[in-house]
Image: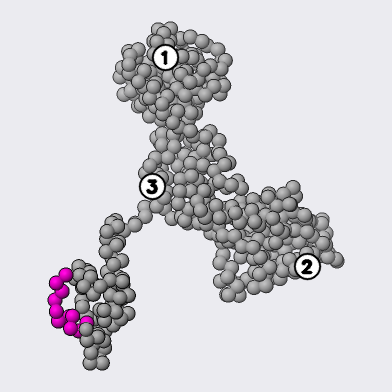
Amino acid sequence: MTTTCTPVDTERSVLYVSNSPDQKLADFLAGSGWQAVHAKSTAIAERMLERGNIKVGLVELPAECTSQHLSALASCMRRVETNWVAQIAPGQAENELVSRFILDYCFDFVTRPWLNDRLVFALGHAHGLSSLRQAPVTPEPSLGRHGMVGQCEAMQQLYRRIDKCSATDAPVFVAGESGTGKELTARAIHERSPRAGRTFVAINCAAIPPSLLQAELFGHERGAFTGALQRKIGRIESAHEGTLFLDEIGDMPHECQAVLLRFLQEGTIERLGGNGPIKVDVRVISATHVDLDKAVEDGRFRSDLYHRLCVLRLVEPPLRERGGDIKLLANYALSMYRQDGARKLRGLSSDAIVAMSNYPWPGNVRELINCVRRAVVMSEGRFITASDLGLPETDHGPAVTLAEIRSKAEKDAIENALQRHGYKLSEAAAELGISRATLYRLMHANRLHQEPAPASRTSNGSGGADSDDEAERQTPSMV
């Protein structure tokens, strides 16, 4: 067996980790079409894994296997590209440490004597599964556009609108719930605009006390107020020739709104304690989770400032309306934080995907990413399960079949048509596009009365029905 770290043909290679080489094993594997590459330590194994895409590993667990030894092995077995098969002695799987290690880090295990078809089958199965898996080691930036993750129609529409907004200097307002990625959208607009090489300055209007917000936006001169020991350039001025992102603009105090409006109208600012206007060239993008239309209606936000900010309007879709993007984002988050866990994670179980798809995600993408990151740390198996996510159970009510939905829709349509036409059956049938005989049959099948309830009958002497329909009520249907 070789003990070097030179690159090898990885297509049918087995990385064999053991304190001592086993020539008999190497010969057996060679006869079965495998190339055995020996590593006598975990450090050598790690270097081999880094230099070649080895899909299958074979690790020999010594008879006296300590937790320190297993921890050292685990350090090089967390790579998701390699499927590991453990070699153990008879009865060794009953050891709690060994069984937990196998469950967490190994695809399969074989028991001595292992020079048989069982070993060949395990290695072949591990190789086949590894070939199918194409999990990225690092996050893929190409899961969407503009540095975002998402492929649903709502996100595709957002991407197109970002491209359009990037071509102009007009103010942009980004609406959306908390956690949907409004700042990502603002940065995407900036990075694709002619101002891309300039500064992008973001300020959270809700995170700064009202008494300090004006000084933070416009800056101040030395001595402008107690504690102003030197001149300070404001956020607007520091964004000169770049982009200013005003996050949570809906929470801006009313007294600051008038000063911001003056800047948007005239393109000039004045530092607190200053004695002259300063010309500033800034592209403004604003965002908030607040319903600004209602805020304007309630008098909490100035209508003139609203119209200045909302020249172009983008809406971030909430996560619950993004369908398959939930699974896409969950796998993306897992690829980012996979190394935070103590165990080698293969991915998300099917019940975890179902649980995430059924959850409404009030915190949107931010909540999903934090949820997956927590599950990576707390999970105890090779896959993140629904219980690892810790999501509250949602009650969707009893299951309803398609036939039941159709039956209810049919019954409602007939009832509504009868009520609109005062239970004149010929008119109701004409509206529904069916014959009176068919209407009778459907009413009978849905247990609907052929006349209105007593409380809804009219007092015009005819009960609101035409004479033909009255006659039809006296004659049972033969259809």
Expressed as whole percent of the image width and height from the top left, the position of residue 165 reads 66, 57
Q: Which residue is mark 2?
A: 266
In this view, the residue in front, 16 or 400, is 400
Q: Amino acid at mark 1?
A: Gly
Q: Amino acid at mark 3?
A: Val
If you read the primary sequence from the N terminus, does the residue marked by circle 1 or circle 3 appear first?
Answer: 1
Badge 2, how many Cα within 10 Å: few under 14, some, many 20+? few
Look at the image and say whether residue 351 sits in the magenta stretch.
no
Query: Is residue 222 depicted above or below 97 in this figure?
Result: below
Residue at 69%, 65% (x, y): give it.
211
Q: CA distance from mark 1 to mark 3?
A: 41 Å
Expressed as whole percent of the image width and height from the top left, the position of residue 98 reads 37, 24
Residue at 54%, 19% (x, y): give it.
48
Q: Which residues are magenta?
A: 469-479
In this rendering, does residue 293 appear at all? yes
Q: Which residue is mark 1?
A: 33
Q: In the visual, does 105 lie left or right of 52?
A: left
Total numbered labels placed on residues in the image:
3
Badge 3, how many Cα within 10 Å: few under 14, some, many 20+? few
Q: Tell me whether circle 1 and circle 3 mark residues in contact (CB < 8 Å).
A: no
Residue at 85%, 66% (x, y): give it.
276
Query: Is residue 72 depicted above or below 279 in this figure?
Result: above
Expressed as whole percent of the image width and height from the top left, the position of residue 329 reads 50, 45
If you read the primary sequence from the N terminus, does the residue marked by circle 2 or circle 1 appear first?
Answer: 1
